[in-house]
Image (cartoon, rainbow, N blue to C red):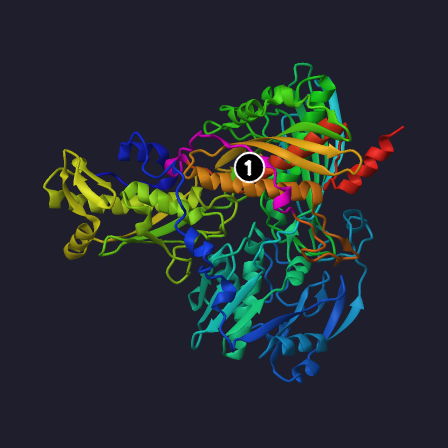
Amino acid sequence: MIELWDGASMEYDKILENLLGRDDYLVVGHSVVRTDALEKALGRARFTADYIPKGTAVVKVVRSSQPHARIKVDVKAALGVPGVLAVLTAADVPGHNQIGYALPDQPFLNGEKVHYIGDPIALVCAEKEYAAAEAVDAVEVEYDPLPASFTLDAALQPDAEPIHEGGNVAVTTRIRKGDAERGFSAAEVEVEDTYETPYQEHMYLEPEAAYAVPEGAGKVTVVGTMQSPFLVREKVAHVLGWNLSQVRIIQALTGGAFGGKDDMGPLVCAKAALAAVKLGRPAALVFDRDESVAYTPKRFPARIRYRSGADGEGRITAVEVDITVDCGAYANRAPFWLWRMTAHAAGPYEVENASVDGRAVYTNKVFGGSFRGFGDVAIHFAAESQVDRLAEELGMDPVEFRLRNVLRPGSRTTCDQLLDHSVGMEECLRGAAEAAGWKRGRELGRKGSRVRGVGVGCAYHGISTSRSTPDWSAASLILNQDGSFTYRTGICELGQGSPVGHAKIVAEIIGAPLSSIRIEVPDTDSTPNAKPTHGSRGLMLGGTAAADAALKLRQRMISVAAEMLGCPEADVDLREGRAFNRQDPSEEVSFAELAEELYVRGVSPAAYGFYTSPRRFYDPETGLGVNYSVYTFAASVVEVEVDTETGQVDVVKVWPAMDVGRAIDPLMIEGQIHGAVSQGIGFTLMERLVVEDGLVLNPNFKDYVVPSALDTPEVAETIIVEEPYRHSAFGAKGVGEPAIISIVPAIANAIHNATGLRFNTLPITAERLYAALRRRKP
C-alpha cells in the first residue's frame, strides 16, 4: 500500500518515478495523436453556436456611442418594434449590477454613466436577428458628455476628469531590492530609454457566444465559450442574485481564447442568463466579428521607462524601471497584469539591486485584459532590448553577456525569490544559440537591397496566478464497469490540449490505453472546481490534480487485483488495460473484470483529486517574497531578412528552446511554440489596432492584419530542456504563455542586428522601418 499525501508538501515527480518503477514511460514524454483530433478535423466537435436551436430568443447589446458621458435611457420606442420581447436595462438586474474582476469599477449594464465607446447600456431580446438589430437602433440614449482622456498623459494630468471615483490611477506596485543607486554607482555603463507596446487583439476564430436555458424555478443552465466555468458561475449568480447551486455552466469546446475568453466568458454568459431568466425561455448572445474586436478586452498597452547598468565584467549591477499600464475604461485584470510585469522587471537575470514602480491608469478606451504572456511580453521586450544595448556598450557578444547574468539554481529573482531547482535558463540559451550557429549568424551580410540579421531573446514566466492568490486544482476519475474511464476537470480545452495531457498522466499512472479515457466537457454540476484555464496552470496544476485522483484509484485497483491474483500488492502492475503479476505476467485480469470486482466488493471505483500549490507570499511594501510557485524558462534565436527598399521584414527562421520541467507530450509543446511564433510575429511586426478618440477604426480581418500561413517562418525543432518541478506530476511546467515571450524581443534585436536601427515602440511595421531607413540615409 502507498501512503497518500497532501500534494503541496510532497515531491510528486519523485513519488511517481519510484511508484511506477519504469525505466521509460508508457505515454508520458511521447507524442501521441490527440484523442479529440478526429472530431475536430471532421467538423463533428460542437462549439457554442452548435448548441443553439431554432426559436431561441436573440440577444443584442445596446452600446454607448460616446467615450465618456452621463446618460438617460428610454426604451419605449424599442419595445414597439415587432418581434421584440424585452429591453433590459440596469434597473432590470435582480442581483448586483457590478461585474468588475479585480476592482468594483465595472457596471454590468450602465444606467448612469458610460466610460468608453461600446460600454453596454441595455440588452434587446427579440424573436429574430433583424428585429433585435432594429430595436438596438430604436433605444434612445441621451448623453451629457464629460471630458474624455484617450492617452496616459491626458489621464494623469492634475485637472483630468476622473473616469472613476478616486481618480485615474487604478492601482500601483513597487519593488525595492538592494540599493539601486549604489548599484548604478558601481556600473561602468548605463543605458536608459522608454519603450511602448500597443493593444493586441486576440482574433480567435470563434467570437464570444453564450446560450442560456431556464430550468424551471430558480435554475439556469448556460452553455458558452469560456476559460473558467466556475468564475462564470460566480458572476452569473452574482448578477442574478442567486446561489451558486442555482447556476449550471457548461463549457462548449472553445475556438481559441488566448486569455480573452477568461474575461469575456463571464460577461457574455451573464447577459444571456439574465435574458433567459427574464424571458422564461432560452436565449442566446453571439457576437459578430466587428463587435468582438471593437468592444472586448485586448492586450494592455504599456509604457516602460527602463534604466540599467553593468560593470566592466559584464554583470548587471542595477535596474530602475517605471511601468505605466493603460487600463482603458476598467481595471479588469490590470492589478494582476501590472504585478506580473513588476515581478519580472529585471528579466531572467540575477540583479542584486532593483527599484521598480508601476501604475495602472484609466483612459476612455476599450479596456485591456488577459492575453497570452500576461504582462511579460511587454516587460521582456524592454528588458531584453536593454540587455542587448548594455552588451553593445561593453563591446560584448549578446549571448555571452546574457550567460554572465542568467538565473541559475541558487539565484534570486527580481523579487528576491530563491530558485532552488527547476531552473533551465542557461541550458535554453546555450542550446538555442548553438543550434542557430550564433556566431555565424551575426555575420550574414547583405544581398542587394536585402540584409539579414539574427537576434536573441530570453524569458521567464511565473506559473500560476499572480499576487500570491491561493491556487488549487481538482479532478475526478471513474472506472466504469466495462474497464473504460470517465475523467472530469474544470480545466478547459481551448485548442491547447491541456485535458489531453491530463488523460496521458492518468493513463501512465493506471496503465490504461489513452483511448479508454473519456474526457468530459467542464460542467459545474458534475465537474470539480479546477479554477481558471490561464497562467499556464492548466497542465501543471490541473494535471497534478489528475495524478492525485489516478493514484488514489490505482491504490484501490491494485489492492483488489492482488486478492484476485493471489499475490502481494507489490507484485501487481497495471498496464495496457490489465492488472498482472510481475512475477508471472500470464496471471492477469482485465480492467473490465477488475472493475466488476470493485463494484461487487463495494470498493469505490471513483476518485477525487485535489492539488494546492506551495504557499506564496510577498511584502506589499517592498514587493519581495515568493511570488510564483515555479518558473518556465525560454530562449529564442531569430533570423530576419529586411528589404531596405520597402522596409518589409521577413522572419526567416526561429530556433526555440524551453525548460518545460518534464515534456508530457513533445508534439503539444511544438504546437504551442509554433502558434506563439505566429502571434509574436504579429505583435512585433504588423498588428496595429487603430483607435481615434476612443473609437476602434479597424475591427475586422480586412483592416486588422494578422499573420497568415505565408508569414510563417521555418521553426527548428524545439530544444526541450527538462528540469523537473518537484511539486507537479512528473515534474511538468506550463508552456502556453511562456512560448511567446522570448520571440518578440528576439525579432526586434534581429532587426537591429540587420539594420543598426533600434525600435522602442511596437509594432515595427514596414512603413515605420522604411521611414527610419530613409531618415538615416545621408
Please say whether residue 238 is visible from this viewpoint.
Answer: no
Label 1 environment density (alpha carbons within 10 Å; few <14, some 14–19, many ≥20): many
Quadrant that contains the N terminus: top left
Judge left or right: residue 418 versus residue 371. left
Judge left or right: residue 415 versus residue 495. right
Residue at point 72% right, 60% down? 116
Magenta-span inclusion, residue 327:
no
Residue furthest out toward the right = 778
Amino acid type at mark 1:
His
Residue at point 70% right, 82% down? 77
Front residue of this view, candidates 180 and 458: 458
Q: Which residues are magenta?
A: 707-731
Judge left or right: residue 407 versus residue 538. right
Magenta-span inclusion, residue 712:
yes
Image height check: is 177 above or below 394? below
Please say whether residue 301 is visible from this viewpoint.
Answer: yes
Residue at point 39% right, 46% down? 502
Residue furthest out toward the front = 448
- Residue 134: quarter of image: bottom right
Element assignment for label 1 = strand
Return the x and y of residue 759 as percentages of the image width and height: 75, 35
Front residue of this view, candidates 392 and 629: 392
Residue at point 34% right, 48% down? 609
Quadrant that contains the C terminus: top right
Return the x and y of residue 421 as percentages of the image width and height: 45, 28
Query: Which residue is the site of mark 1?
Result: 461
